[in-house]
Image (cartoon, rainbow, N blue to C red):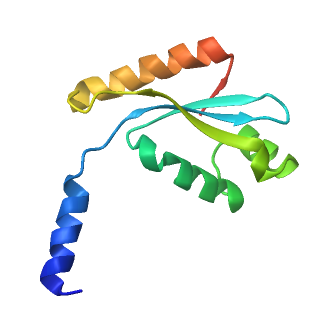
Amino acid sequence: MTQTNRKTLIAAYKERPTIAGVYAVICSATGQVWVGKSRHIDTEQNGLWFALRHGGSPYRSLQAAWKAHAPEDFRFEQLDRLPEDISDLRRKDELVSRAKLWIARLGAEAL
């Protein structure tokens, strides 16, 4: 890979549209549900699973459930996606309100 090609690929990666949204982590063994929000929902599961596997998740109840059950008992679901054209200021407020809505609907714990 040439230096120019590498720079082009990096620039394209940085300019790709980000998709914000609300997600749920569900433990099928216990029925527990956790709901979170992310500005990059497409990559959120990778980071979350990495932290859980290494015991570094800031979400204590989720980490405890992860330790008590097999990783196969957990699934990640995208619940809601925001449109790409939403402004940055509105995105944050919209994520908070949609996350609260899903927490109430599912009787979930907030992440």
105 vs 23: above or below: above
Q: How many marks?
A: 0
Q: Relative to 82, is 1 above or below?
A: below
Which residue is drawn at the image coordinates 80% and 42% (left, top)? 65
Quarter occupied by residue 107: top right
* The quadrant where residue 28 appears: top right
The percent coordinates of residue 29 (x first, y second) are 85, 36
Position of 38 compared to 60: left or right?
A: left
State whether residue 66 appears in this view: yes
Instruction: Determine whether 108 is above or below 29 in the image.
Output: above
Quarter of the image with the N terminus in it: bottom left
At a point 43% along the width and 17% down the height, the residue shown is 97
| Position of residue 61 in the picture relative to residue 83 (left or right) | right
Image quadrant of residue 83? top left
Most distant residue in the left direction: 4
Residue 55 visible: no
Q: Quadrant of the C terminus?
A: top right
Question: Residue extending furthest bottom?
Answer: 2
Measuring from the top left, give residue 58's x and y in whole percent.
Answer: 63, 47
Q: Residue shown at 50%/22% (left/top)?
A: 99
Position of 35 with respect to 1 (left or right) is right
Q: Position of residue 43 (x, y in %)?
A: 45, 50
Instruction: Determine the residue positioned at 19% across, 54% down.
Output: 15
Vertical placement of residue 61 versus 107, above or below: below
The percent position of residue 79, horizontal first and vertical second, equals: 52, 27
From the viewer's perspective, is 65 left or right of 3? right
